[in-house]
Each structure stands twice: as C-alpha cells, then as structure tokens.
C-alpha cells in the first residue's frame, strides 16, 4: 500500500502556519502539507466539496493537525463531522492548540481526537514537538487499512 504522506494543517493564524511549516522543514518532515484556514474549508477539502470539488476524495491525509479556535466551524465541529462519516472516521487527528482548558481536552477526546498537544510558546520546543509528531504519526504509527472507498 502506498501511503499518501499528506498532512492537513487546519490553522487560521498565519504566524502559526509559518512556524509549523518551518518546524516541519527543520525536522526533515517531507510530507506534503496542505493548509486550510477554517473549519469549513477543512471539511470541503476532506469531502472534496466546494472549492475542492475536483480533488480525488480517495486521497486522504495521513494526519490532520487541527486547531480548536477556527472561523466558520470550530475544531470540535470539524472533529464531530469527521468522526460521523465512515470515510474519515479513522483518520488520525491531533488537536494542536494553545488552549489549556480541561473541557477542551475532554471534549476533544470524547469526540475521537487521537491526541491533544498544546502549542509550545518557545520556538525550540515547538520544533521539537513538530519533530516528535512527525516521527510518531508518519513513521512509527501504523494507520488503519484503507478500503476502496476511503479509510475505514
């Protein structure tokens, strides 16, 4: 099986996008990184609708890095939608956020997040966190087998 090697980064803060891209580059994570700026765009990308209607819906990301506080549809809304659909139910989703709220952590896991990671404030820590995320989710982790109609 050929793995897609795509990371979907769902982040509305341009500085956090730049920092994440730089951190992955410094960590030698060579996957394609698709960036979307809000929850609605993330759902459009994953289900090949809206401006992504021409995208091959069978090509799914290997990993979704999902911010909690997003315009249009927040991170929990995106996660709820992903877990409700057979095609995306098993995609690995890491909540990557600045939130320290216990209710956000609990809600994320209750809705099926695979991990909850606080964005480190320190740049060196952020690069280290990105390296560990990449190593674990893209190298060490064994994803669920794909079906012909997508994951699951």
Image: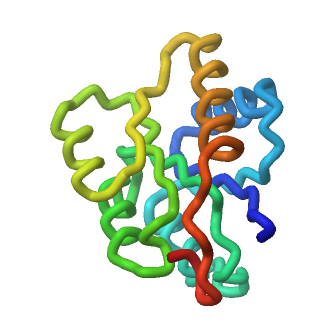
- Percent position of residue 46, x then y: 56, 72
Task: Specify whether 58 is left or right of 105.
Answer: right
Choose between 148 and 68: the one closer to the eye: 148
Residue at image coords 37%, 45% = 68
Against 18, residue 6 (above or below) is below
- Percent position of residue 58, x then y: 66, 81
Against 149, residue 12 (above or below) is above
Q: Say which quarter of the image contains residue 115.
A: top left
- Percent position of residue 57, x then y: 64, 82
Task: Specify whether 95 is left or right of 22.
Answer: left
Against 42, residue 125 (above or below) is above
Q: Say which quarter of the image contains residue 146.
A: bottom right
Choose between 84 and 73: the one closer to the eye: 84
Q: Say which quarter of the image contains residue 67.
A: top left
Task: Specify whether 147 is left or right of 112.
Answer: right
Report if residue 50 is visible in the image. no
């Amino acid at each position: 099986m050929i793995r897609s090697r795509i990371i979907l980064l769902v982040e509305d803060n341009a500085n956090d996008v730049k920092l994440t891209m730089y951190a992955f580059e410094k960590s030698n994570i060579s996957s394609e990184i698709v960036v979307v700026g809000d929850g609605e765009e993330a759902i459009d990308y994953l289900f090949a609708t809206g401006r992504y209607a021409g995208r091959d819906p069978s090509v799914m990301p290997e990993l979704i890095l999902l911010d909690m506080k997003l315009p249009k549809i927040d991170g929990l809304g995106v996660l709820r939608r992903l877990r409700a659909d057979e095609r995306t139910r098993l995609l690995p989703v890491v909540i990557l956020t600045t939130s320290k709220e216990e209710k956000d952590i609990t809600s994320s896991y209750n809705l099926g997040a695979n991990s909850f990671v606080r964005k480190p404030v320190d740049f060196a820590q952020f690069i280290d966190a990105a390296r560990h995320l990449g190593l674990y989710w893209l190298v060490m982790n064994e994803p669920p087998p794909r079906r012909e109609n997508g994951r699951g």
